[in-house]
Image: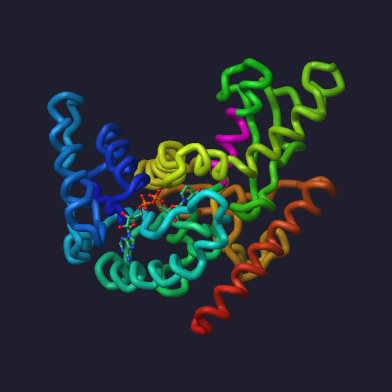
Amino acid sequence: MGKKISLIGAGQIGGTLAHLIALKELGDVVLFDLAEGMAKGKALDIAQSSSVEGFNADIKGTNNYEDTKNSDVIIITAGVPRKPGMTRDDLLGINLKIIKQVAEGIKNTSPKAFVICITNPLDVIVMALQKYSGFPKNMVVGMAGILDTSRFKYFLSQELKVPANQIESLVLGGHGDTMVSMLNHTKVNGKPVYDLIKEGKLKKESLEDIVLRTKNGGAEIVKLLENGSAFYAPAAAGVEIAESYLKDLKKQLPCAAYLDGQYNIKDLYAGVPVLIGKGGVEKIIEIDLNVEEKNNFENSINSVKDLFNAAKKIDPAL
Ligand code: TXD
């Protein structure tokens, strides 16, 4: 029996997750959605591509949590996405209610699952999910930093005309306008990005534009699509976390994780580098931040705290 991966939310990201997981043969997939037909239709459609693609994975759709029981991994995208002009934070009220329903649905059926949350506003929704579900904090993680870092690397690779995989970087903090591109931890082919500026190979203004475009990366796609938000890159990022867990790869990945004193932050989820293996979030990696990075990170953490306080006003049980 292969691993069981349940996807709560069979929308744009959920359907893409199912497809990628099937292609990579990471496990058997249960696509769950309130819109039962959407879940069943997408599951059937992906399953019918198995003979073309040559993958062996069982894919089912449902609107019944019983069908998701004893999952090894649960990836949550249930919620509403942004419309043009909306911020991620504007989704708080409705998605908080949805994540409470999802927590109720999974907490008794898959108590041992590793749960990856994608629903926005990510940092607060993943925190609420952990509190509502009561799952161990190391078994509940949020996907955002991998996506933000991937956007940053892509933009920089286009500017420098180098392959994105030659770029190391980290975008940490909250998944919102205050996210922090860690420029002192950004290297191109092993060379610090600041040296490229000194050598005249990269303009300072261009780097600043890339930092800003990364912050607005989601909004840029929302504006282009007009209806819905990004889903290919978010799904790829979610699968990277799931794969590192299922195969015990111990990848160091920027994720929204529970901080209990690390980076001088207590009882909060925020984007930091973590080690993902069979133990879930196995380690919070504390990197040295220079003064600018520290200030920007602190500012971002304060934004997450403010939004969490807004969530507590909506639901004092949090
Ligand atoms: O980096 C990140 N974390 C972000 C996250 C990147 C991109 C998108 N981000 C957020 O993911 C986005 O703002 C949304 O909050 C979620 C899902 O985005 P998606 O584009 O997949 O939204 P869809 O296509 O609307 O799919 C959401 C599905 C939809 O099919 C609903 O019927 C379903 O969620 N839904 C539910 N399923 C189960 N249970 C409940 N209560 C429920 N409510 C809605």
Instruction: Residue at 36% x, 53% y: name it.
Output: 75
Q: Is residue 30 left or right of residue 7?
A: left
User: Which residue appears at 64% of the width and 44% of the height?
Assistant: 215
**Residue 147 part of the magenta segment:** yes
- Which residue: 60% across, 67% down? 268
Q: How many marks?
A: 0
Q: Position of residue 296 (x, y in %)?
A: 77, 52
- The residue at the far bottom in this view is 316
Chain part drawn in magenta? 145-154
**Image location of residue 83, percent across then percent down:** 48, 52
Residue 310, relative to residue 149: is it above or below?
below
Type of secondary structure dominating the magenta stretch? helix
Residue 226 sits above or below residue 187 on the image? below
Vertical order, 84 against 122 (above or below): above
Asked if residue 131 is among those painted magenta in the image, a careful observer would answer no
User: Where does the image place residue 127, in percent across and percent down from the top left?
Assistant: 51, 66
For residue 259, which quarter of the picture? bottom right
Compare residues 259 and 20 and report the one nearer the observer.
20
In the visual, does 120 lie left or right of 164? left
Relative to residue 226, is residue 73 depicted above or below? below
Residue drawn at 85 percent across, 17 percent down: 199
On the picture, is 260 further left or further right than 73?
right
Q: From the top left corner, tell me how far across and down residue 99 is, in percent.
A: 40, 67
Q: Quarter-wise, where is residue 35 in the image? A: bottom left
In this view, the residue in front, 233 or 113, is 233
**Which quarter of the frame holds ligand 1?**
bottom left
